Image (tube, rainbow, N blue to C red):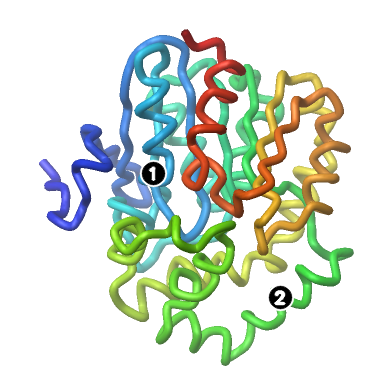
Amino acid sequence: MTAVPTWVDRAAFPFESKWLELPAGRMHYVDEGSGPAILFVHGTPTWSFEWRHLIAGLRETHRCVAPDHLGFGLSERPAGAAYTPEAHAERLREFVARLGLERFTLVVHDFGGPIGLPLAIGSGRVERLVVLNSWMWSFADDAEMTKRAKMVAGGFGRFLYRRLNASLRLITPSAYGDRKKLTKAIHAQYLRPFPDPDSRERVLFALALALTGSSAHYEALWQRRADLASLPALVVWGLKDTAFRPNQLAKWREALPHARVIELANAGHWPHEEDPQAVLPAVRDFVGGA
């Protein structure tokens, strides 16, 4: 049995840890509660810890499943694995099949969009969709995002990720609506899985490169956005997000014209962590919780 590392804050994250052996490596996940299933798909540079408030608030009425992508959180980080969104998406598909999740609400955040949304296209598994500050389209026509991607793609960007842990020490704090909400205790839960340069490059820098390197994957999702338009959908957006601007929210309004959209004026990139008092009731109401 795999032990939970001592650095995990069990007061904040009291859920039972489970692991699933996949061909590429061992994935950690939590599976709490019973009832209609909800699958939570995190992005970078976090892990299932980011869903703790929603899991705690929904597990009385729903089965809450939250995996850590390979390389993140408490999952394994095999040297030979691929850490692109496409590879994570394929492993997530395997994970869902192995757990026997036939019908569920899909909740995605950040890179969780392009990783999790393939499950909602053509599979018939996804009943409802919740999107929090994420995307599913190429940034080829987005000058700001393309500029950012180019900045991190070169040697200097690699240095920043490897040596300074830029993803967690620079980008993450700047994307909070109120940096004080990223306490030292919370920040530590995200820093500890990436203690050395190789772990940061292998997993975090790989996704930084994928902002433009996986454009074909995003474009393929966008071309099938009509498959999502009929799903009941909720979009929750932190307007102080410095990573995903309001023009990204406009794209979701286009893709999901019937979605309920909640804009949180004081939240940043992690609305479910920064303002759970607003996000949890909205999600509970959407999924039909008591």
Instruction: Decide: few, some or many residues near mark 1? Use Cα within 10 Å; few <14, some 14-19, many ≥20.
Output: many
**Residue 66 sits in which quadrant?**
top left
Identify which residue, 149 or 76, lies in the foreground.
149
Q: From where the camera sits, is residue 53 visible?
A: yes
Q: Please state the horizontal and vertical placement of residue 137, each as a whole percent of the image.
A: 78, 51
Q: Count the marks: how many?
A: 2
- Residue tagged 2: 148
Name above or below for residue 208 compared with residue 256: below
Name above or below for residue 171 compared with residue 98: below
Which residue is pictured at 40% across the width and 12% down the height? 61
Q: In which quarter of the image is the N terminus?
A: top left
- Residue tagged 1: 48
197 horizontally vs 177: left or right: left
91 horizontally vs 243: left or right: left
Q: Earlier in the sequence, mark 2 or mark 1?
A: 1
Identify the element where label 1 is drawn.
helix
Name above or below for residue 127 compared with residue 54: above
Which residue is pictured at 45% across the width and 66% down the height? 203
Q: From where the camera sits, is residue 82 visible?
A: no
Q: Please state the horizontal and vertical placement of residue 142, each as a whole percent of the image.
A: 85, 65
Q: Which amino acid does label 2 sit on?
A: Arg
Which residue is pictured at 81% across the width and 26% down the height? 229
Q: Which amino acid does label 1 sit on?
A: Ser
Which residue is pictured at 35% across the width and 68% down the height? 79
Q: Please state the horizontal and vertical placement of residue 268, each as a whole percent of the image.
A: 61, 54
Identify which residue, 290 or 230, lies in the foreground.
290
